[in-house]
């Protein structure tokens, strides 16, 4: 049987070859270092603004208990808090990536730190973003292809329809998705919203706007049914009040006009009007109580968010340190040169037995 050949690398021989080639190795590292410096200074600066929220927990049920107790005192059975929400903190990141939520950010007015940019967020993302020099050929090709596709077609309208976005609006939306990062701590349900942007003031502005829109969306969702019920009760209240007022006026007018008459038929008519007025009053009273409960239910369903950390304008950029980029390129140059040296002297470095 033939024995298997073993391949061994002679480290001493490899070091000797590297030592003999140290000048070219040094020049290679310097060259890659210069490339690293160019790359480091070509990358646009980015800034990150962060907002931390703590939503309400199940412990906030005192108001529900109070409303239920109030309802039981007037003979009504109203139980709050028994249902479950379809939107809970764990799906907030998915919510913030939805088309409706992102499109609502388009009209936000933004202004850069130096005051040179003052426009809405959509135009800022579309036209005011800085890119590295090596991205210009790619952008030129994309714009050229886009012009050829759009040639002869009708121009895109300025109106934004979330149901039917244009290609450009969709690309802006995708850019915004990349700028928004939302994390939810599964243990504490603490929500961390982080916005990345090339301007520190705009980053803080968008972080605060995203926080406000998230609160508004969740509030509208959780109070939607309660607000509809309140609107319905207000309508019933106005109708009951109008009917009671009308019945009271009819009774008062009939009583004033016939107060000296003793005929039984007139007294019977007066009692019927009085009973009708009392019935309308009872309905009016019950609807009034239900209206107050509906108002309390809206308040009970309104979620509370504690702002643990509000948005602030970042002072330092969040780019990778330039020294790290320089060191990475020098290391890449060193590895490539050593690899090339090893390949060229593979017969002397590698021995087979």
Image (tube, grey):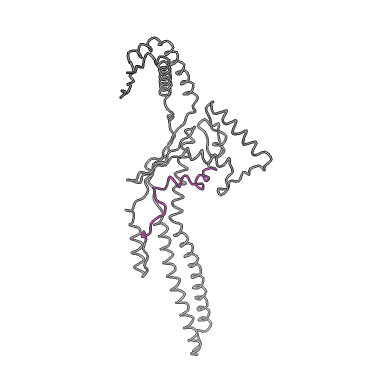
User: Percent from the top left, x then y, of residue 252?
Assistant: 50, 78
User: Percent from the top left, x then y, of residue 237?
Assistant: 48, 67
Q: Relative to 114, does residue 244 appear above or below in the rendering?
A: below
The reply, left or right, for residue 49 in relation to residue 111 is left
> Any magenta on residue 104?
yes
Q: Relative to 173, does residue 263 appear above or below in the rendering?
A: below
Image quadrant holding the C terminus, namely top left
Please give the name of the residue rendered at 57% of the width and 31% of the height, measured from the top-left corner: 139
Please give the name of the residue rendered at 62% of the width and 35% of the height, measured from the top-left corner: 145
Residue found at the far right of this picture: 152
Q: Nearer the viewer, residue 276 or 47?
A: 47
Q: Nearer the viewer, residue 36 or 304?
A: 36
Image quadrant holding the N terminus, namely top left
> Any magenta on residue 102?
yes
Q: Nearer the viewer, residue 103 or 8?
A: 8
Query: Which residues fall within the magenta stretch?
Result: 80-107
Figure disc tally? 0
Please give the name of the residue rendered at 51% of the width and 43% of the height, measured from the top-left corner: 105
Please give the name of the residue rendered at 53% of the width and 82% of the height, measured from the top-left corner: 257
Residue found at the far front of this picture: 1
User: Percent from the top left, x then y, of residue 159?
Assistant: 60, 46
Q: Relative to 217, does residue 129 appear above or below in the rendering?
A: above
User: Percent from the top left, x then y, of residue 110?
Assistant: 52, 38
Residue found at the far bottom of this picture: 263
């Amino acid at each position: 049987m033939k024995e298997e050949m073993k391949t061994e690398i002679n480290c001493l021989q490899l070091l000797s070859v590297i030592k003999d080639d140290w000048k070219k190795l040094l020049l290679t590292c310097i060259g890659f270092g210069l490339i690293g410096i160019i790359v480091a200074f070509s990358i646009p600066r980015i800034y990150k603004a962060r907002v931390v929220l703590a939503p309400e927990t199940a412990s906030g049920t005192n108001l529900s208990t109070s409303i239920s107790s109030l309802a039981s005192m007037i003979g009504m059975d109203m139980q709050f808090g028994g249902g479950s929400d379809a939107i809970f903190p764990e799906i907030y990141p998915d919510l913030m990536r939805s088309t409706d939520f992102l499109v609502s950010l388009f009209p936000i007015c933004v202004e850069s730190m130096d005051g040179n940019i003052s426009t809405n967020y959509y135009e800022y993302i579309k036209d005011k973003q800085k890119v590295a020099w090596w991205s210009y050929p790619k952008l030129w090709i994309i714009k050229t292809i886009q012009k050829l596709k759009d040639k002869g077609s009708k121009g895109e309208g300025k109106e934004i329809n979330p149901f039917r976005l244009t290609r450009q609006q969709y690309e802006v939306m995708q850019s915004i998705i990349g700028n928004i990062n939302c994390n939810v701590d599964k243990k504490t349900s603490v929500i961390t919203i982080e916005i990345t942007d090339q301007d520190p003031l705009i980053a803080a502005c968008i972080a605060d706007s995203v926080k406000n829109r998230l609160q508004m969306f969740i509030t509208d969702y959780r109070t939607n049914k309660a607000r509809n019920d309140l609107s319905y009760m207000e309508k019933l209240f106005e109708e009951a009040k109008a009917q009671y007022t009308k019945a009271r006026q009819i009774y008062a007018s009939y009583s004033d006009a016939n107060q000296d008459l003793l005929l039984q038929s007139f007294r019977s008519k007066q009692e019927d009007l009085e009973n009708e007025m009392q019935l309308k009053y009872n309905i009016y009273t019950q609807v009034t109580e239900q209206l107050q409960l509906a108002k309390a239910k809206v308040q009970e369903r309104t979620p509370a968010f504690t702002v643990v950390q509000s948005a602030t304008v970042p002072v330092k950029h969040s780019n990778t340190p330039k020294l790290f980029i320089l060191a990475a390129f020098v290391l890449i140059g060193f590895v490539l040169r050593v690899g090339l040296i090893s390949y060229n002297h593979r017969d002397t470095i590698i021995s087979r037995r």
